[in-house]
Amino acid sequence: MICLLIVGFYYVHYQVHSYDERIITKIDNLDTSRWNKPRVAIVFGASVYSNGDLSPVLEDRVDTAIQLYRAHKVDRILVSGDNRHPSYNEPKTMREYILNHAVEPHDVVIDFSGRSTYETCVRARDVFGLRRVVLVSQGYHLPRALFIANRIGLDAVGMAGDLRLNQEIDYHSAREWAAEVKAYYNLNFKPPIVNVDERIPIN
């Protein structure tokens, strides 16, 4: 039984990492020149501190998206995250940070219901009408994000936002193993319910 569990675990891990060749680590290596416009970068939410500061993980993601925008690799930035509590709002805080770095307000779009990687990807497709995207996150998270996005029909590449090392990376990398199993289960057996009632096409 234990052997079967180990084999199954590694099979899931292999499947989740089947899109790893789509991970890009240098902005200059991302070629979106032939993409239909607007070209969109999706930034996944992460922790925001009680004082309103972005956590190092989230700040790296957002800074990477800003670099993509300034390099004319993308035209819009879709920020997606958790705002389930009145005192906690990841996407709003992300948008304010981006606007403070000279990005045009029209070019920053908020998804207030992206409470998980799966929800963010499904809503990008069904609510915002996206078909081709750049996913912005850390290298430890991108394999799962790319697996979900491409399996649900998005043509997605990943831009690694690993701008600095911090103490959270080891924790998140270990946590990611369990999240991979959940992602595989959601895609193959029991998809979560996602709120896709509205339509907000990005143009």
Image (spheres, helix red, strand yellow):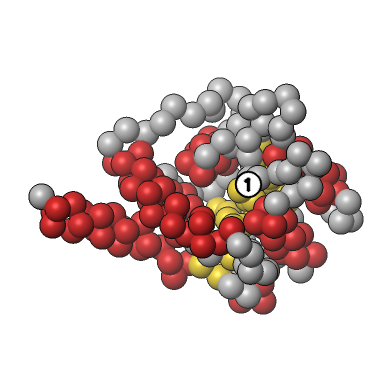
Q: Residue at x 89, y 55 (%)?
A: 102
> Which element type, helix, strand or loop, lies under badge 1?
loop
Residue sticking out furthest to the left:
1
Count of all numbered marks drawn on residues in the image: 1
Q: Residue at x 41, y 48 (%)?
A: 179
- Residue 83 percent coordinates (x, y): 67, 31
Q: Nearer the viewer, residue 35 or 45?
A: 45
Examine the rendering and report whether any part of residue 48 can be seen.
Answer: yes
Q: Which residue is mark 1?
A: 46
Q: Nearer the viewer, residue 5 or 191?
A: 5
Q: Residues within 10 Å of mark 1 (few under 14, many from 20)?
A: many
Question: Which quadrant is the C terminus positioned in?
Answer: top right
Q: Residue at x 61, y 32 (%)?
A: 113
Residue sticking out furthest to the front:
167
Give the answer, above or below, for where 102 lies relative to 93: below
- Residue 61 percent coordinates (x, y): 67, 57
**Amino acid at circle 1:** Ala
- Quadrant of the image occupied by residue 192: top left
- Residue 60 percent coordinates (x, y): 69, 60
Q: Nearer the viewer, residue 175 or 91?
A: 175
Give the answer, above or below, for where 56 lies relative to 47: below
Give the answer, above or below, for where 178 lies relative to 137: above
Q: Residue at x 58, y 45 (%)?
A: 130
- Quadrant of the image occupied by residue 9: bottom left
- Residue 20 percent coordinates (x, y): 43, 66
- Quadrant of the image occupied by residue 59: bottom right
Q: Is residue 123 left or right of residue 71?
A: left
